Image: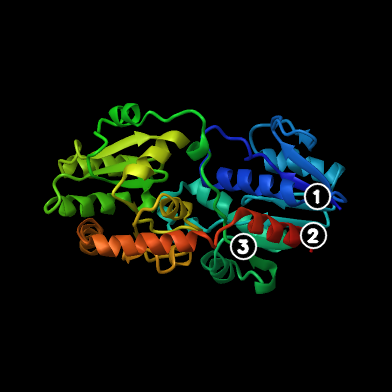
Amino acid sequence: MKIGIDASRYKHAEATGVEWYSWQIINGLLKVISVDDELILYSKERLGLEKIQNKILPGLRLWTLKSLSKEMRLNPPDVLFVPSHTLPLNLPKKSVITIHDVAFKHLPGVYSFSQFHYLNWSTKFAVKKATKIIVPSEATKQDLIKYYNCPKDKIVVIPHGFSEPKSVNDEKIMNESVIFKYFDIRKNDPYILFVGRLESKKNLPKLVEAFAKFQEKNPDYRLILAGKRGVGFEKIVKIVNKSSLAHKVIMPGYITEEEKAVLYKNCKFFVFPSLYEGFGLPILEAFYYGKAVLCSNTSSLPEVGGEAVHYVDPNDVEEMAAGLDKLASDEKYAENLVARGRERLKLFDWEKVAKKTLWTIKE
């Protein structure tokens, strides 16, 4: 079987959710693909993968709708796999797409007019045209059924996997003192960590408000919000300044894998108060580093965290502040969550994800 894969998001210097998934799932498929199958990776630039057919399709803007669509019309594979939301206009006989979430339906206000309508159109198109749709959670499956009347038998739920971070086994020794100096904190200073894009749907304004209340009993703590700026970042800054917490809330921007490893390793616990997530990979990262987790009780997050997380209503600042205090003050409770998290992490394996994805592609 000739299998084509949209690899346009495979190689990103500052990879976030969808890019990270593309990198993981494509690498996984390369390991489990049969020798009888022919694999073609379509991309905007050369990917640097040996012994793999990599077809470069020119174009920057609307690459999927123009360049990939043209390739599908002229040289269609037997099946096309797209690891993100948008299918090309022209399709082979079979096509499989991963739809990670429909956050724009839940939180339309955090998207621009053009973003919302493009995402809505591309999702409708995928539901109508794709042979199969892979989703990372039951929550996303139910959203597709609710908002787009997608047939249940077209949807396959395949939760994401987890792999040990590269930086952990990096031969280069991480100089933790240099990293902490860069973040303007001392290694032994207690801090709470968040990792993700700094945007409205991550609910960070309410987290900052909850942290301000938490500070009343725990004045030594600091809060690190690590990630690239997104829509709504200005509001987060305003809340921080209004609460007089500028010296307590650290926002370093995008962090490297080495920096992330150091911050996870040394934080007191991890918070993820997002209003909506299609999956929630940072929860698994926190499990790996042996950290207790506080997160929202919404969307897919309970599917990821199971009974290994302290859940709160993301809209209730008082409840969130109480949860922060619980993890900071109740050592036995936090240790119990850590132990459960380590066990739960074993359920998420990229090799199993790749095998199930390949089966879905070839079905």
Helix, strand or loop status at disc 1: strand
| Residue 156 x %, y % | 65, 66
Contact (CB < 8 A) between labels 1 and 2?
A: yes
Which amino acid type corresponds to the residue marked 2 in the rendered image? Lys
The residue shown at (57%, 43%) is 19
Instruction: Check the image and report above or below for 53 versus 95.
Output: above
Q: How many marks?
A: 3
Q: Residues within 10 Å of mark 2 (few under 14, many from 20)?
A: some
Instruction: Check the image and report above or below for 70 versus 346.
Output: above
The residue shown at (48%, 55%) is 104
Helix, strand or loop status at disc 2: helix
Which amino acid type corresponds to the residue marked 1 in the rendered image? Ile
Gap between marks 3 and 2 measured at Cα: 15 Å
Q: Quadrant of residue 23?
A: top right
Which residue position is annotated with label 2?
A: 362
The residue shown at (31%, 65%) is 313
Which residue position is annotated with label 1?
A: 3
Q: Residues within 10 Å of mark 1 (few under 14, many from 20)?
A: many
Gap between marks 3 and 1 measured at Cα: 19 Å
Left or right: where does residue 71 sit relative to residue 17? right
Which residue position is annotated with label 3?
A: 158
| Residue 152 x %, y % | 65, 73
Q: Earlier in the sequence, mark 3 or mark 1?
A: 1
